[in-house]
DNA sequence: TATTATTGTTAGGTACGCCTAACTTTGTCA
DNA sequence: TGACAAAGTTAGGCGTACCTAACAATAATA
């Protein structure tokens, strides 16, 4: 009940939060410019977002200063990053999707799935990849299954 | 290259398209009011959306008239509905998520996943539920696996 | 056919999220 | 220290997507 610490965050603000979280993990200090580059937005957009994040007590920030996350900011960012990681892992390790595509899809979908589904998904990945479980090497078997679904691997241009 | 027939549709317009598609399937004729109710938006919002859909040649519409989809509108709506169906089926039949929750999550996520991942997901559902495949009864086995992950089913209120 | 309820539209306003252009602050280096 | 470049901010504008209030059209009923 403090203010609006978590949850009620737009997809856009979640992206900013996640970007700060990642940049911070990679290079220590976080500057507006890094955020802008990382998200592909202009500097004024970053300024606006930082003001909102500060207002929600998710980021520490003063004009012309460095950026860091507050405790709840870090917690929220970690939740978002977790979603991202779980989704990407599912796409790549279970569905066998290309890494780049998985990365992009995870970026978009991470905003629309709640913790219940993400947690289930995480369990599912474990289930499938844990060698002790009955789901053993399911991904590999699924890959074979898919090969059969795509019958014509090189039938282009109808050469004859 | 006609105008902007498909793809470049906002999540919002996709929702309108899908709603029209569904109402049309259920009750034949589609009125603005039905769309408003179905999406939980006000009538003026519907009017605005219909104008845009008409402009993109996805819906047939004149003021005060009935609404229907054009050929490409129906095709686009069917693509969206397919995504919705595949996602929901995955959530329910594979992950074992509650139906209502799955429905809502599918509504949101359907806008952020492309056909590659949706198709893979569809194959995966088939793989898991087809009795001939090696994925046989995976959902059931996964359910058991999950039960073990949640060890304390009734440990609330620390009664002692 | 005149009245009324329902349905739909226009007008106008808000919030978000982005942009460019112009200005300010900060830090560096001669 | 003073000038310059880089980084950051403010100002102002645009598009989307919603809303309420007020008005217009349609349909139903006496």
Image (tube, coloured by chain):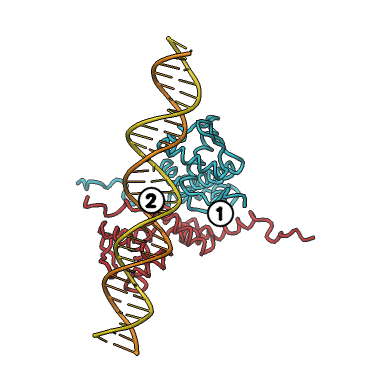
Chain colours: A cyan, B red, C yellow, D orange
- Quadrant for residue B68, please give it: bottom left
Please say whether residue A97 is visible from this viewpoint.
no
User: Which chain is indicated by disc 1?
Assistant: A
Left or right of residue A11: residue B71: left
Residue B88, above or below B33: above
In the rendered structure, find residue B114 and report the number of the disc placed on it.
2
Q: Is residue A73 shown left or right of residue B43?
A: right
Q: Where is residue D18 shown, x and y percent of the image?
A: 41, 59
**Residue closer to the observer: B130 or A21:** A21
Residue A62 in percent (x, y) is at: 54, 34
Q: Residue at x 41, y 68 (%)?
A: B37
Q: Residue under circle 1?
A: A120
- Up-down: is B35 above or below A28? below
Q: Chain of mark 2?
A: B
Residue A87, horizontal then vertical, whole percent: 49, 47
Q: Residue furthest right?
A: B160
């Amino acid at each position: 009940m403090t203010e609006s610490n978590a949850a009620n965050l737009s997809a856009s603000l979640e992206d900013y939060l996640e970007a700060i979280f990642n940049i911070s993990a990679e290079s220590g200090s976080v500057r507006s410019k890094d955020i802008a580059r990382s998200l592909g937005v202009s500097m004024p957009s970053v300024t606006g977002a930082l003001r909102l994040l500060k207002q929600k007590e998710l980021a520490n920030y003063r004009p012309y200063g460095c950026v860091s996350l507050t405790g709840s900011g870090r917690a929220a960012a970690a939740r978002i990053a977790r979603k991202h990681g779980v989704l990407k892992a599912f796409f790549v390790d279970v569905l066998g999707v290309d890494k780049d595509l998985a990365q992009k899809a995870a970026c978009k979908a991470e905003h629309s799935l709640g913790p219940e589904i993400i947690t289930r998904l995480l369990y599912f990945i474990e289930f499938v990849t844990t060698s002790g479980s009955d789901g053993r090497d399911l991904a590999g078997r699924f890959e074979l299954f898919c090969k059969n679904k795509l019958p014509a691997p090189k039938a282009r241009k109808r050469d004859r």
